[in-house]
Image: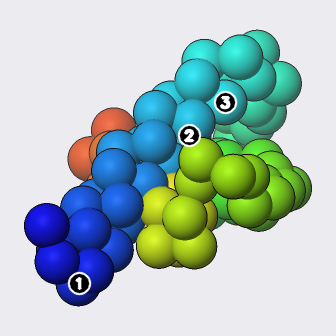
Amino acid sequence: MNKDHQAYSDFKEGINKGLDIARYTFEENVDKFSLSFSDEAGAVKAKNLQDEFSQLLDEIVLTKKPNCSEECLDGIYMGFEVSKKIFEDFLQEALPVEN
C-alpha cells in the first residue's frame, strides 16, 4: 500500500473513531445537558444544547500514541466536527423555530 493511501485510510479510521468518541461522550454526559429552559424558544434551546455538546468535545485532549498516526489523530478531530454538525442538524429538526 502506498503512503498516500495509508494516510487516507488512517484519516478515515480516525473520523470513525472521532464519531464513536463523540457518541460515547454524549451518552456519558446526557444527564448534564440543560433541558429545563421551558420558556425559551426552540432556537435558543438548540443553541444552548449545541454549545454544551461542542464544549464537551472541545475539552477532549488526545495525544499522539505510537499506534495512532498524525492522520488518524486529524481524522478523530474531524469526526468531532462532523458529530457537532450532526447534533446541530438533529436539534434543528427536534426543536423547530417557532413563529
* First-in-chain label (2 vs 1): 1
Label pair 3/2, CB-CB below 8 angstroms = yes
What kind of element bears circle 1?
Answer: helix
Q: Residue furthest front?
A: 1
What kind of element bears circle 3?
Answer: helix
Q: Does the image show residue 66?
A: yes
Residue 49 versus residue 64: which sits nearer the camera?
Answer: 64
Amino acid type at image mark 2? Ala
Residue at 58% over, 24% down: 24
Residue 65 versus residue 47: which sits nearer the camera?
Answer: 65
Residue at 81% over, 58% down: 63
Query: Is 13 drawn above or below residue 71 in the view shown?
Result: above
- Separation of marks 1 and 3 at Cα, in angstroms: 31 Å
Q: State the residue position of label 2.
A: 22
Residue 76 versus residue 86: which sits nearer the camera?
Answer: 76
- Separation of marks 3 and 2 at Cα, in angstroms: 5 Å
Name the spot of residue 55 as percent of width and height, x first: 79, 57
Q: State the residue position of label 1.
A: 4
Amino acid type at image mark 1? Asp
**Relative to 79, 16 lies left or right:** left
Name the spot of residue 7 as percent of width and height, x first: 32, 74
Total count of labels: 3
Q: Determine crowd level at label 2: few under 14, some 14-19, many 20+ residues with C-alpha closer than 10 A.
A: many
Label pair 1/3, CB-CB below 8 angstroms = no
Image quadrant holding the C terminus, namely: bottom left
What kind of element bears circle 2?
Answer: helix
Name the spot of residue 75 as percent of width and height, x first: 44, 65
Residue at 55% over, 64% down: 69
Its colouring scheme is rainbow
Amino acid type at image mark 3? Thr
* First-in-chain label (1 vs 3): 1
Q: State the residue position of label 3.
A: 25
